[in-house]
Image (spheres, rainbow, N blue to C red):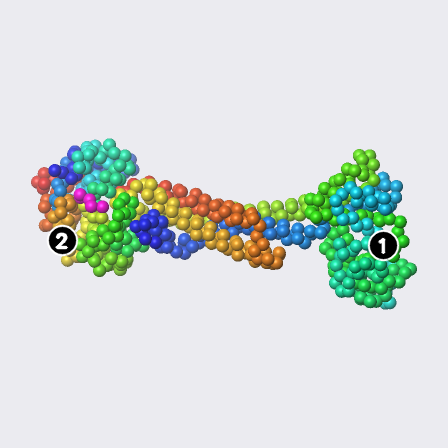
Amino acid sequence: MRLDRFPVTALAWRNLSRAKSRSALATLGILIGVVAIISLGMFGTTLQAFFIQDAERFLQTAQVSPGEDSESPVLDEDDIAEIGALVDAQVYPVESSASVIKSSRETTRATVTATERPRAFVTAATGQIPKNWRSGALVGQRLASQLEVSVGDALRVGDRTVRVVAVLESTPRGGFVQADDGVFLPPSQLDARGASRVLLRTDSPEAAFRAAETIRQELNTDRQERVNVFDAEASIQRFQSQISTIQTFLLGIGAVSLLVAAVSILNVMLMSAIERREEVGVLRAVGYHRRDILQLMLSEAALLGVVGAIAGAILSVGLGAIINQLLLGDPMAFSDSVLWNIALGMGFGVAAALLSGLYPAWKAANARPVEALRD
Amino acid sequence: MTVISATDAVKEYHSGDRLLRALKGVSLSIDPGEFVAIVGPSGSGKSTLLNLLGLLDDPTEGQVTVDGTAVSGLSTRERTEVRRDTVGFVFQDFYLLPTLTARENVAVPGMISDRTELLERADRLLKRVGLGDRLTHSPSELSGGQKQRVAIARSMVNEPDILLTDEPTGNLDQETGAQVLDVFREFTAEDVAVVTVTHDKQVESVADRTIELVDGKLDPDHR
């Protein structure tokens, strides 16, 4: 950098390069603070995307079952039609009961679930879920290994014999449909008078919440609870409070490391101001104004901050790409808010550096040139 | 015509609860191109006088005048500007910036005022003081006499009317000291006044005039 073009920046840069390891350590402090602040937003958003991706189907579902004041323990065809007319959603009547299950080797009790279109909730690990499902059983993974059955084997469910057409992939815990320990049959195979519950599948979590609310308002009154409606809103709130805990934690790390960095820059600049008393005195003697000295010292602090902030931003984006790859399978899956996070982190880093450079710079600028030169 | 003058200048310092009178009423004036040596025992107020003439310090009483302008009425900022345009400093300890090359050190005073052809000006001055082959050396690669010549070139870069120097030969052997004095002599030939505080007889011998300070006053026999 030519001294006659950018005199202050060039002088500041050379001064910093005089005590390289000291400057590097001060920069490292800023870097850590900036990484923590950028991560605060970036990783929070990535985690959120990750959880929502995993729980997407769950969040888009609401469940309706007979309420406390219902006359029947099941929802009949009229009820289901009424529910279907109220909301814009796919409607899946589901009937579950417990039954004795026998294979050629083992006998156990398990949940038998009857539903017409099971593909909405489960996927086959081996075998296939038939398109037009009239017969055959889908068996949960854990139950299949307990009964030692696989695709093609015969199974006795209650008093009828069915053939296993698919073994299912395991489903996330806490979902509306639990596949692992149960058997799925077409409704025609189960003599039921109705469905013990109806699942509503929508396009988005918000639509699911709206559908649940509509049904509550239309079918229930203050005094009479005809149906019991459950959606994932409570789970979402729990999840969001977890995210905000993580963010508070990162914010704490960011604040502490920026504070430490600021103190370290204060120390570096004060030492440098004391070591360079005579130099500053000479600069004042040859005609530098107090403001020029102030500017020079603040430029040094700012340079420490800017270098730390840039390195911190690069490191954060690198870390972010790695985490995106691990959680979302795409290194570039940054959200739009990431730019804002980077600006915020860099801003805080440079501001912390400038702020802690203020006092040493003021001290150096206001030393009287005579006293600075007196041995 | 006078470059800088002091009239009845008094300087008092507080040292703890004691009041020290470093200068007890000193009057002198410096003409263009004059080489003036200020001598006297340590503690006689030589450096204090130099600081007053260089506008680095204010007299407690009396007046310092630069090119006809009284300095005491000026703000810190204005005084810094008068100093930059009129006075050059050369110190016993050189005080070069270790991170800068010789030519950059010479350019330092010009960087915040007049940056036109600054490095070229610095190179010309370094050639004049005989360091044309050391332009891009750093101070650690230069000898004491070379460093002092860089410092003199630096003091000349803003084309001052007067050079104030404090023991410029104090850290140099006799031969190098003589080279430095030759450089000063060249500048006085161009009407730049040189005022130097010194203990060095060699300096006295080349000076046009020697002023002796004793206990804060000018010695009347030695004007």
Please check the rendered image and state whether residue A295 is part of the magenta-colored stretch, yes or no.
no
Estimate the x, y position of residue A333 in percent, counting from the top left: 58, 54
Question: Would you call the spot at circle 1 few (<14 residues within 10 Å), some (14-19), or many (20 or more)?
Answer: many
Q: Residue at x 20, y 48 (%)?
A: B156
Q: Residue at x 81, y 50 (%)?
A: A93
Estimate the x, y position of residue A92 in percent, counting from the top left: 79, 50
Q: Quadrant of residue A21?
A: bottom left
Q: Quadrant of residue A225?
A: top right
Q: Amino acid at mark 1?
A: Pro
Q: Amino acid at mark 2?
A: Asp
Estimate the x, y position of residue A174 in percent, counting from the top left: 74, 52
**A338 relative to B30, above or below:** below
In the rendered image, is residue A259 in sight? no
| Residue with the mark numbered 1 | A187
The residues tagged by marks 2 and 1 sit, at their Cα atoms, a distance apart of 114 Å
Q: Main secondary structure of the magenta part?
A: loop
| Chain containing the residue with disc 1 | A
> What's the mark number on residue B182?
2
Estimate the x, y position of residue B194 in percent, counting from the top left: 15, 46
Seen from the viewer's position, the closer of residues A303 and A375 is: A303
> Which span is picked out in magenta?
B158-162
